[in-house]
Amino acid sequence: MENRSLVTIAEHSKEKIMYLLEMAKLFEEHPNRKILDGKVVATLFFEPSTRTRLSFETAANRLGARVIGFTDPKVTSSSKGETLKDTIMMVSNYADVIVMRHYLEGAARYASEVAPVPILNAGDGANQHPSQTMLDLYSIYKTQGTLENLNIYLVGDLKYGRTVHSLLMAMRHFNPTFHFIAPEELKMPEEYKAYCRAQGIRYEEHTEFNENTIAEADILYMTRVQRERFTDLMEYERVKDVYILKNSMLEKTRPNLRILHPLPRVNEIAYDVDSNEKAYYFQQAHNGLFARQALICDSLGITIEDVRNDKTIIQ
Ligand code: CP
């Protein structure tokens, strides 16, 4: 049987990505339907989340599915020593698809290999966050009108930031030029730079972050320094506020520039940026609803033609 899990965005072709974005657009036009009537979606969050969990759950609810799950593994039998495999096997008895966030890199891959139902990776450690990437791509496409030939600046915690790792893999289809802006301690890991070289993706690395560095950006993708991934908190204190985007830095930027951030934000975007028309991070999070509706449907074998012909729309 075809495995309809989403573990890493690297598994998706350009055609599949464009197909899912087209499906997301149909859901943005009509987000309220009963196309998932009778289905059960499980959300298993072994790590904290606001947007990913709530947007997946909203996506399912607005399509008529029921949602089960947990937000804290301490209240589940994994706190009594139940293995991830057993937990996944049990939940597969109850749900048609499992959305899972886990603190261990590779947990989603493992779950997809043991589960009889699809697994949607909602973030595994510092590794991948493919559903975030789908909403990032949708946001880039909506704001730029294309995914091709863009200058994309990734700023902040490029070492632990799973969203930037997934995004650069997805962009391999679209001839981007990346600029990696990070302090030495949080540089883009060598494995991802090697991936860029192997895929012919251009990139430059910078440690400076100012109005001149970002003047040619189409997309400025800010990230939070992830305190929870540091083993040395002194190191976290040294780097946590090293880059702060301020409104005054945007004066010389391109008119089409949009600022993205997977959120949550801590200090890396000053609040005076929020009212700038180039700030797009709250709309970006909203786009997550439609991107995740497409991902849930795709995991359940619902095609774009099914969505186009759907007669269950609630006006
Ligand atoms: N972007 C993102 O993953 O946010 P949450 O941690 O709130 O889900």
Image: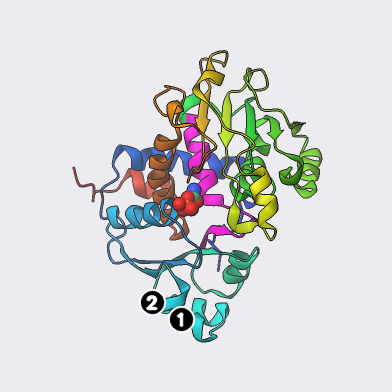
- Highlighted range, magenta: 119-141
- Residue 230 appears in which quarter of the rendering? bottom right
Q: In terms of secondary structure, where does tag 1 sit?
A: helix
Q: Does residue 41 appear in the picture of this structure?
A: yes
Q: Is residue 114 above or below residue 208?
A: below
- Give the quarter of the figure containing the C terminus: top left
Estimate the spatial distance between the alpha carbons at disc 2 and disc 1, rounded to whole Å. 7 Å
Judged left or right of residue 32, residue 154 is right
Residue 94 is labelled as: 2
Report the residue at 57% width, 28% height from top: 219
Contact between labelled residues 1 and 2, with CB atoms less than 8 Å apart: yes
Tell me the amino acid under the disc marked 2: Tyr
Q: Position of residue 202 (x, y in %)?
A: 76, 30
Q: Residues within 10 Å of mark 2 (few under 14, many from 20)?
A: some
* Residue in front for this viewpoint, 186 or 56: 186
Q: Position of residue 81 (x, y in %)?
A: 55, 85
Judged left or right of residue 263, residue 181 is right
Tell me the amino acid under the disc marked 1: Met
Residue 90 is labelled as: 1
Q: Is residue 20 above or below residue 280?
A: below
Magenta residue check for 135: yes
Report the residue at 61% width, 67% height from top: 107
- Give the quarter of the figure containing the N terminus: bottom right
Return the residue found at the far left.
315
Q: In this view, does 247 lie above or below 222?
A: above
Residue 214 is labelled as: none
Report the residue at 46% width, 81% height from top: 90
Report the residue at 47% width, 73% height from top: 73
